Image (cartoon, grey):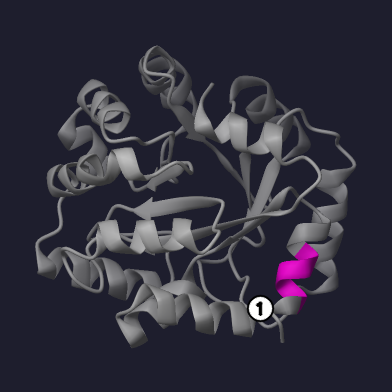
Amino acid sequence: MNKINQLFENNKERKLLSLYFCAGCPTLESTGDVIKTMQRRGIDMIEVGIPFSDPLADGPVIQSAATQALKNGMSLKKLFSQLKAIKDEVQIPLVLMGYLNPILHYGIEAFCQSCVESGISGAIIPDLPFKDYQDIVKPVADKYDLRIIMLITPETSEERIRFIDDNTDGFIYMVSSAAITGAQKSFDEAKQEYFRRINGMNLRNPRMIGFGISNRQTLEAAQQNAAGAIIGSKFVTLLNESSNADEALDKLFDALKR
């Protein structure tokens, strides 16, 4: 069974925590250490960002991390090499998150094959059109048992959400707002209503809520309305400040208690 499906199947009574970081930042060779440290510290799933020069959905924190990673020399080829080196040491699901351009340049089939060879269980491609996913990407991803995770926002129609739910597997990435990534202090009533609306749809796939989670209030709101939470910008900021994954996690866990 795919590790993503296994994670949700085995943890129906527990809320999950997934963290995002950008591969190659703070240093080119830190990727493997960051992943292994997060696993050791109890993180349930990890999103590994593929740095790209034009990250449309990302806020300034993740944009800056991607710029630094590219300056450090990170590439998709280099990332797969790093992931392959630690494959046997990682038991939790790893999900690559990146934009379509570098993946197309690498080749869809080659990308999916390299994912499997490197221990990757899924991919999130924010700018992948759903028709292209269905017609081009899904058949290849299915061949390699790779989950392609789709995003929904408060603006996504119920019809489209149900269509996504019917045609994907793994989990649905529920973006807390239509804005770019970045930490928020709280989720307003409009976001809470969005969470409740999606909850009421009784979707087949589990959902993870991301974008803006940085403290206890936002974490609890996400956990109450989904299978768990995804934290990106807050952790990336702390990791860049300390350049040490253990220290960054200490500070993150402290912030999530407040």
Residue 98 in percent (x, y) is at 35, 48
In magenta, the rendered stretch is: 217-221
| Residue named by callout 1 | 256
Q: Measured from the top left, where is residue 169 in percent x and y?
A: 59, 26
Specify the amino acid type for callout 1.
Leu
Direction from residue 182 to residue 97 in the image, left or right = left
SS for dot 1: loop
Residue 248 belongs to the span the image colors magenta = no
Residue toward you, 163 or 233: 233
Image vertical order of residue 150 relative to residue 175, above or below: above
Q: How far across and how far down the image is residue 198, in percent?
A: 81, 45
Is most of the magenta stretch helix, strand or loop? helix
Question: What residue appears at the point 87 percent right and 53 percent down from the top-left corner?
Answer: 196
Residue at the (47%, 31%) spot, across then down: 148
What x and y, as percent, mark residue 103? 25, 37
Q: Quadrant of residue 35?
A: bottom left
- Is residue 181 in sight in this rendering? yes
